[in-house]
Image: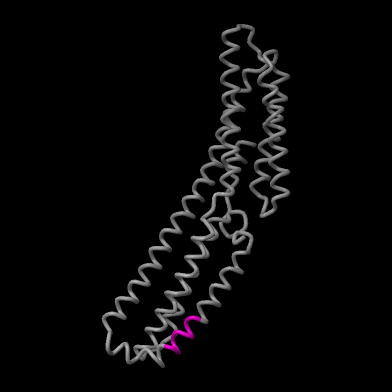
Amino acid sequence: MLYDIPTPVLIIGLVAGMIGVVEGGLMIGRRYGRPRWKNAREIHTALTAAALALMGLMLAFTFNLSASRYDIRKNLVVAEAAAIQSVRTSLDFLAAEPRARGLGLVHGYTAERIAYMHLGRDPTREGEAIGHSRAIYGALWALAVDSRNYASDEPQLRAAQYAVLTGALLDLNRVAREREEARFRTVPQLVIVMLFALAIGAGGVLSYMAGATGHPDRLPTYVFLFMVCLIIYLIIDFDRPRRGLLRFDAAPLERVQT
């Protein structure tokens, strides 16, 4: 699976492929492309521009996909922090002893969700962290659905408080599940493969034209392709928030915990 390959390995492979294509394109362009360039200069120029435009369009499309998924994951962290705070506030409806137990459970739940953020690419530990947080959530739910734990003796008020607390817990469970599922919302592998192919193909077209025009200057070509590789690295990094340079900030959850 493409997602399991470390990002530096992917980018090194892309750079190696581009170097080979550039050198090969320059050689072929110098040897075979000059007569064709003289006879069809406008067509070759248009084809080069079209190849570069197509690559730019693909870069923009893929960047938008990965950035939007990153924003979704980031916003879900904030939403989960707000849901935890809502549960904590609703615990005020409980009597003193159940409320103290509930606050301890909320504190433990928040700690587990923070730990879940700091795990790398480790499905086993991720599963354990999710299991622990769900067990704590189950204890919170059992506390909330027991009508004897509420401080009020008035039936209608107790029913309203029951609805508020259980509703807050249901909302917390929904956000937590969405955050866990968002972990697997990545740019489709086929899109990344096509992006790699377009980048290498555009590099080949650009270097071929450089050789065919009689000005095989490698520096501008390599600088351009290096910038393309940086953008592709950023696209992949957006999809790997726990493994790359881009990491989520646990501050929203930490503020709730403290």
What residue occupies the far top of the structure in this picture?
154
Write the residue at 37% across / 83% down.
209
**217 with respect to 99 (left or right):** left
Q: Is residue 206 above or below residue 28?
A: above
| Structure colour scheme | one colour
Asked whether 28 or 233 is in front, the reply is 28
**Image quarter hosting the C terminus:** top right
Write the residue at 35% across / 68% down.
53
Q: Is residue 249 above or below residue 57?
A: above
Asked whether 250 or 109 is in front, the reply is 109
Q: Residue 194: x percent and y percent?
A: 48, 65
Q: Main secondary structure of the magenta part?
A: helix
Q: Residue 8: x percent and y percent?
A: 60, 68
Write the residue at 46% across / 79% down.
222
Write the residue at 67% across / 14% down.
147
**Image quarter hosting the N terminus:** bottom right
Q: Residue 129: x percent and y percent?
A: 71, 43
The region drawn magenta spans 21-28
Asked whether 69 or 89 is in front, the reply is 69
